[in-house]
Image (tube, grey):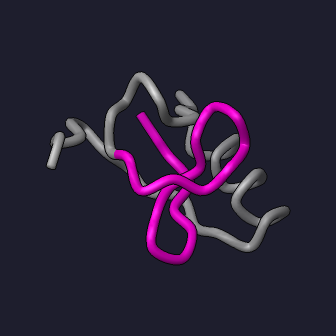
Amino acid sequence: MYVVKVLHGYIGKEGQRTREKDPGKLLVFTSKQESDQFAEKIGGRSKHVSKIRKD
């Protein structure tokens, strides 16, 4: 499971930056290639996560 990290947060399903770490609210990619392509377009980075904590 991969997410796109930007600045001080992640990209949510709505396409907006969010500080939420809830997997139900984040834009999740199954392959690293898809995540890398999207991250490159928006100026973020791809991050592999096995489990996202709810802080």
Relative to 19, is 33 on the left or the right?
right
Q: Nearer the viewer, residue 19 or 3?
A: 19
**Residue 49 at what x, y percent from top left?**
31, 45
* 7 to the left or right of 20: right
Q: Residue at x 74, y 73 (%)?
A: 43
Q: Quadrant of residue 50?
A: top left
Q: Where does residue 15 sit, x and y in percent of width and height?
A: 72, 43
Residue 33 shown left or right of residue 6 in the figure: right
Up/down of 1 relative to 44, above or below: above
Number of residue marks:
0
Instruction: Please give the name of the residue rendered at 47% of the width and 42% of the height, measured from the top-left corner.
Output: 2
- Whether the magenta-drawn stretch holds residue 30 is answered as no
In the depicted structure, whether residue 29 falls above or below residue 38: above
In terms of image quadrants, where is residue 52? top left
Q: Position of residue 34 (x, y in %)?
A: 70, 41
Residue farthest top in this picture: 24
The residue under the point 60% across, 56% down is 17
Residue 30 % position (x, y): 53, 28
The magenta segment is 1-20
The outermost residue toward the right is 41
Q: Is residue 13 magenta?
A: yes
Residue at horizontal 33 percent and vertical 34 percent from the top: 22
Please state, as top left, top right, bottom left or bottom right, where the N terminus lies in the image: top left
